[in-house]
Amino acid sequence: MKLIIPMAGRGTRVRPHSHTIPKPLLPVAGTMIVERIVETFARTLDRPITEIVYILGPDFGREIKEKLTDMSERHDAKASFKVQDVALGTAHAVACAEEKLEGEVIIVFADTIFDTSETVTVEGADSVIWLKEVEDPSRFGVAVLEDDKITDFVEKPSEPISNLAIIGVYYFKKGEELNEEIQYLIDNEVKGHGGEYQLTDALDRLLKKGKIFKKATVDEWLDCGTLPAWLETTGEILEKENPKFGTYDNSTIHPPVFIGEGVEIKNSEIGPNVSIEKGTKISDSTLSQSIIQENAELEGCNLNGSTIGNHASLKNATGKLHVGDHSIIEQS
């Protein structure tokens, strides 16, 4: 089975970090967002993923492809890459993997982390759509059910027709059938919300042709699409996983925290809800509710609700800061 992951978007709401890395590669407690998604499929799906197709932006370079290739190989899957030159909607993004849309495929938009305690079976369905109950369905595209089969899709309903939000994860038994409907939309310029080609319009066409759509429900659906959401989701994952940590020189650790390989901490107070990626050095600092990425150096800092980039260097910084990769901040 192929897993297709559109990730060409620039992730403007998580800047400055998305200036240098695609949003799905950002870490959540030591694991990239996209890898957490792959791990969920490995744990909950009734069949293995053998190939992962990444749809990237035109300016994503070799280093990003190498990271994704390494990650795919860790999960016994081949990595393939396609390019979306211009963002024209969700259906257009999937269309960029046109020749890969054959046989069994799963499509996942890597903006969120999700989890379920149940094994998901795709037997007896032409398509399976992952859903989550929500309090305010008017904010989402929703699926309408009848006897556990999906009968309709409604984008941001004004009436309470369903509280089952579509989380952006889809299985198709025959990817070529989906491709046919997407190409119809593009060839005939059938555009939906926002004047773009929408995947839900292709789903509607499949429904009208009598294809059987079933649901898979999730227990967790955690957003990583903004800086506050990334911090909040990291905190929730830390609470759930409660990673182990060692002892550090004259320092106090308040769990839950994630502390990566090779991290050095001296004369500091860390936590709760702090994630520190590998190779970072921290001294004489107090950190809470924050994410510190790889190989950063912090000295004399007092930070809360902050996100610090890879190889950033901060000295005597205080408050709430969002600092990109390779930045230098020194306050007197």
Image (cartoon, helix red, strand yellow):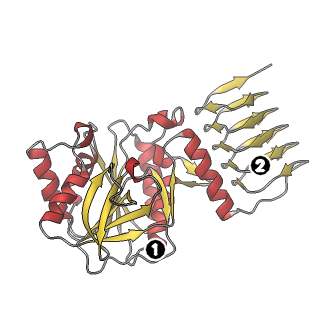
**Residue 1 location in percent, x, y?**
31, 70
Q: Is residue 64 left or right of residue 262?
A: left
Question: Which percent across, then down, holds residue 327?
Answer: 62, 28
Residue plotted at (40% across, 47% down): 139
| Label ID, residue 168 | none
Element type where label 2 sits in the image = loop
Which residue is depicted at the point 46% across and 71% down? 42
Please name the residue shown 37% across and 40% down the image: 9
Residue hosting label 2:
271
- Under mark 1, the amino acid is Thr
* Residue 44, numbered circle: 1
Q: Marks 2 and 1, Cα distance to the nearest angstrom?
A: 31 Å
Residue 75 can be seen, yes or no: no
Q: Which of the image's four quarters has the C terminus?
A: top right
User: Given the image, on which type of amino acid does mark 2 rest?
Assistant: Gly
For the residue pair 291 and 262, the one nearer the viewer reads as 291
Q: Which secondary structure, mark 1?
A: helix
